[in-house]
Amino acid sequence: MANLDSAIDSAFWDQSISSPQTLDGSAKSVPGEPFPLDGARASKALRIQQLSFLRNGFPLGVIPSISPPSQKDLGSFSLQTLLLRPSTSNWWLGLIGQFRPKKLISAIKTELQSADELELPVFRDAAKHFLDKSLYSVALATQLSLSPSTSLLWSTERQGEKKGYRNKFKIYHQAGNSTPFTFIYSYCIGILLPDHDITLDAAWPELFMDHKGKYWEVPESISLDMSCLPSDSGLQYHFGIHKNSGHPQAFNALDGEAPSALMPGLCAKAAFSYQKRKDIWRRKETKEDLILKTDKGSYWRPSYDVRLREPHAAISGIIGGTCAAWFGKGPRNVESQSEDNIPTSNNNRSPLSADFFGSACYTFQHGQFRKLYGDLTRVDARLDLSSLSSFAKRIFKSSSANKTLSSPRLNLIFQQQVAGPIVFRVDSKLLLDSKAGKLGPHIEDVIYSLSYSLRLLRSGKVVAWYSPKRKEGMIELRLFEF
């Protein structure tokens, strides 16, 4: 089933998007914008945990990725590896290193071609290019488990071609485990919340990605979020407080306006949603499916992914609303140009706002994902409406309608088994609107991926994806998500 939680998660600042632009492998989505592709959502596993696992399957433990750099001569291709990871029962420390080889290869090639004779001084000069700091990036991260359900995470990274460090601090309490610590913690804040996820997230600077694939750096970003576990009735709610400090700066582009949600200010936001799912038909897994009988005997044959083990057709939907209150200077009150001459948004940011959103999804799956060939074909079609108020204004031809949010979008996910645990997947987003030069619906974004499911992890897979829009690609470990 396509991820319906994107509808409510996209309203807040804590939704992570996979991105090779940072060594921790993620950036935040801009809240209040159209929902991102399911294939773009970041892995639940930390990047250091991913590299620790992935290096076992790659030569020398080196994992490649593609991301446009700020300096073109560095090249988009980079190599990452886990240099160090000491750990104890409740603590670990990790050191990630990244190397961009293109500039080094080009410099050495030029050095050797320009030399009349290949003598020792020529090789000495060529070796000096290895000392170019712009070729290397490094990140240090550590996690401390305060209890089975509460963890503290701190990380810092330095990109070789950039000045300064990117620092992150996070405290995460996951619902489901009740310990003396969590009871004391809940008692101190006056509320006992056994069925809620609580996250305190701070970064300086924080990297955000808008729906156009452009990146923005906010000098300081702090957020506190609390969300409840989905109830049996389908009701869910989410509260958050967020503070931006400093003007957002363009990270990889020199044109466009910074989103108003990233401008300085303090925002308190609440959202609720109601989600429902109904199977049209479903073939339940049986004991006979798990046992393969051959001439040599019977063998245990579970599905490559437990979440893809039952053929079915289903419909689902989510509807909800948000309300927000902004405090501090809005876009109307700040300078129209940032320090780097990047225009900021001129859209008025209302101090008080409320809106509704919704999604409807149809899923069809053929096969149980057990056999070597032809045992999985799956299609998910999800219609998203990010802003009901903007959509209504557009219907009534109001000039104040937000063009970005007023158009419905159709997310299509196609998955096809290639061989055994290998699956090819396409995530695409169609904008059901016209734009300059194009009539009718057109593709707004697409991500191609190839995954290798790991049967021992029940629902884990190694995913290699590429985004033509962002010209980015990376290899990730993803658990209990598809």
Image: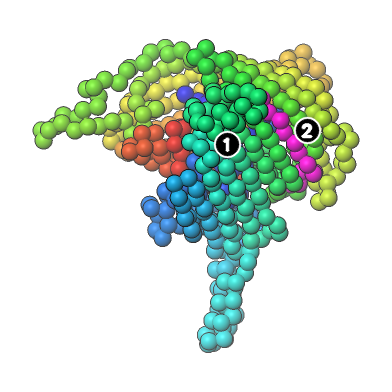
Vertical position of residue 60 compared to residue 280: above or below: below
Tell which tag, 1 or 2, sits nearer the viewer. Answer: 1
Task: Report which residue position mark 1 lands on.
Answer: 172
Q: Position of residue 308 (x, y in %)?
A: 38, 27
Question: Tag 2's secondary structure?
Answer: strand
Is residue 65 in the magenta section? Answer: no
- What's the residue at 63%, 57% (across, down)? 159
Q: Position of residue 277 (x, y in %)?
A: 48, 15
Q: Amino acid at mark 1?
A: Tyr
Part of the protein shown in magenta: 239-250
Toward which corner of the image does residue 423 lie, by quadrant? Answer: top left
Q: Is residue 349 left or right of residue 162?
A: right
Task: Report which residue position mark 2 lands on.
Answer: 266
Q: Is residue 281 left or right of residue 402?
A: left
Q: Residues within 10 Å of mark 1 (few under 14, many from 20)?
A: some
On residue 399, the disc is none
